[in-house]
Image (cartoon, rainbow, N blue to C red):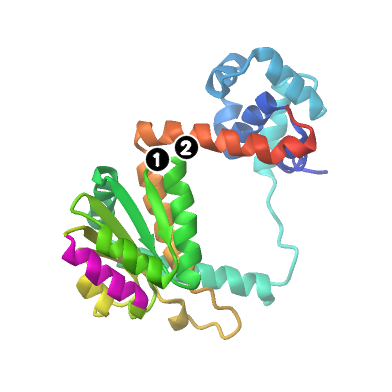
Amino acid sequence: MMKISDQIEGIFPTLPRQERKVAMIAVQKPEQVQQMSISELASQASVSNATITRFVKRLGCGNFASFKISLARGDDEEAEPKTDESDATANVLDFYGKVLRKTRQKLNAEELRQAVDWIKASHRVYLFGIGSSGYSADEFNQRLMRMGIYSTAMTESQIMAMIGSLTGPDDLVIALSNSGRTLAVNEAVNLVRNQGARVISITSYPDSPLTKLSDLSLLVQNTRFIDNSYFINSQFSIMYVIDILTTLLAQDERFSQKMSRTIDMVEDKRLSSFGGN
């Protein structure tokens, strides 16, 4: 029998907009929902009680009480592995675990908070990255923009150098480079320093040229040093730090509200083709 959470995820794109709000809370916070009354859930989702009633009946539940029982039953079910532990799924999971643990050991909570404070205080945030790190810069830029933070990703060397020469003391540059030796990034960062802007780097090597050019360096685990000859994701540890910084920023009510509004808008447009309303 399909778990209620899996059922919700399966029909999510076809749900009306108000019901999607309920669905998201139910999937993300099932244990909390189990302790709520229908009015409490309606208040948290900013919907009516009737919306919740329609939602639970769509799932085949007679009422809200039976919906909560289904949620609890889903939590109690143990997820049995579908494959042998020696296969690729287990290997990749083990790889991810090692990267995350080793990166966490390198990170300093005070430095992460300092980075967040600088992002908040900056007039403009520029994200520098080339190649794979450029994709991470684009992703980070999207998140900052959704929070209402003025940011731009620079992933082309000539434009990066041009912007570097135009930054000022109120600006912040976040440079992404696993090796810390990407020439175009380092040259642009050097221009930034000459203009008086702050520089944060996310990189793997404490003695790299980029680290030495930075006012603050957030060090991550280089995935090349994890024993896995088949799977190489050079950006996984960098994305982990981006996730942490995003989470810390979202703790500020100003940014979390703006992010919620922009996510709702993007979600509405994305799902409109499914007939949601």
Percent coordinates x, y for residue 170 in the rendering: 21, 49
- Specify start and end residues of the magenta stretch as a single range: 184-195
- Left or right: residue 125 versus residue 259 is left
Percent coordinates x, y for residue 13 in the rendering: 74, 38
The quadrant where residue 264 appears: top right
Q: Amino acid at mark 1?
A: Ala
Q: Residue at x 73, y 35 (%)?
A: 272
Depth check, front residue: 138 or 187: 187
Q: Are marks 2 and 1 in contact (CB under 8 Å)?
A: yes
Q: Nearer the viewer, mark 2 or mark 1?
A: 2
Q: Residue at x 46, y 77 (%)?
A: 223
* Residue 194 is one of the magenta-drawn residues: yes
Quadrant showing the N terminus: top right
The quadrant where residue 62 appears: top right
SS for callout 1? helix
Q: Is residue 231 above or below residue 93?
A: below
- Outermost bottom residue: 229
- Mark 2 → mark 1, Cα distance in angstroms: 8 Å
Percent coordinates x, y for residue 60 in the rendering: 82, 28
Q: Residue at x 37, y 51 (%)?
A: 245
Q: Which residue is mark 1?
A: 250
Quadrant showing the C terminus: top right
Q: Amino acid at mark 2?
A: Met
Q: Are there few (<14), some (14-19), or many (20+) residues within 10 Å of tag 2?
A: some
Name the disc covering residue 38, or none: none
Q: Are there few (<14), some (14-19), or many (20+) residues within 10 Å of tag 1?
A: some
SS for callout 2? helix
Q: Which residue is mark 2?
A: 259
